[in-house]
Amino acid sequence: MPLGRIDFANAPSYEAIPAGVYEGQTDTWEAKPSSKGDSTNIEARFRFDYTDENGNIQNRSITKWWNLKKEALWRLRADLINMGVDPSEFNEQTDIEALLNQVFGAIPTPVQLTIDKAPYTPPTGGESQLRNNVIAVKLVS
């Protein structure tokens, strides 16, 4: 299917937003191989509304990554507990897919996202740019 020509002249930019705490909701999750191929990462997406300096409301999406290496599981456990998973669910036989589906299920879970804004240089080099990262997430009760 040909796409033809597209006018990017007045397309909105997608700048990093100010660091802060934002009300949002869970969206989706997906398991992906790590960049080194030695483990699995969970890519979790969250949605939230951001009101810019002109009063325009933008529906934003942000991604948080969790690595499933043993030494990194503490962060996934802490975040899932903060999003309402019972701490007793974590043991030698934890069904992580079931827990992720519980939080990222058909009905979005309301969450509070703490987002920072920090410089980032792409691994392939190039100019440093500002980007947002989720540094904490918790259930809105």
Image (spheres, rainbow, N blue to C red):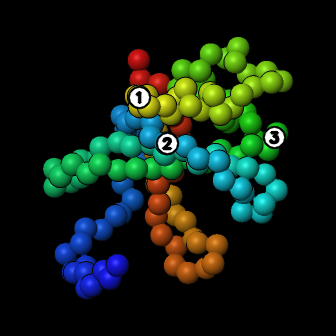
Q: Residue at x 59, y 32 (%)?
A: 100
Residue 9 coordinates in the image, percent (x, y): 21, 81
Residue 29 coordinates in the image, percent (x, y): 55, 43
Q: Residue furthest left?
A: 55
Query: What label does residue 28 carry, if any?
Result: 2
Tell us which disc is closer to us: 3 or 1. Answer: 1
Tell us which disc is closer to us: 3 or 2. Answer: 2
Asked whether the beta carbons under mark 2 and mark 1 sit within 8 Å of each other, the answer is no
Q: Secondary structure at mark 1?
A: loop
Gap between marks 3 and 1, in whole Å? 31 Å
Q: Residue at x 36, y 54 (%)?
A: 17
Q: Which image quadrant for residue 38? A: bottom right
Gap between marks 2 and 1, in whole Å? 11 Å
Check the image and report above or below for 56 versus 126. Answer: above
Residue tagged by mark 1? 107
Residue tagged by mark 3? 71
Asked whether the beta carbons under mark 3 and mark 1 sit within 8 Å of each other, the answer is no
Check the image and report above or below for 139 versus 97. Answer: above
Q: Secondary structure at mark 2?
A: strand
Q: Residue furthest front?
A: 1
Classed neighbour count for the residue bearing mark 1: other residues with Cα under 10 Å, few (<14), some (14–19), many (≥20):
few
Tell me: 33 left or right of 129: right
Check the image and report above or below for 29 versus 141. Answer: below
Classed neighbour count for the residue bearing mark 3: other residues with Cα under 10 Å, few (<14), some (14–19), many (≥20):
few
Q: Secondary structure at mark 3?
A: helix
Quadrant location, the N terminus: bottom left
> Which of the two labelled residues, at mark 3 and mark 2, occupies the earlier sequence position?
2
Evaluate whether residue 49 shows in this view: yes
Q: Nearer the viewer, residue 65 or 50?
A: 65
- Amino acid carrying label 1: it is Ile
Q: Residue at x 64, y 72 (%)?
A: 123
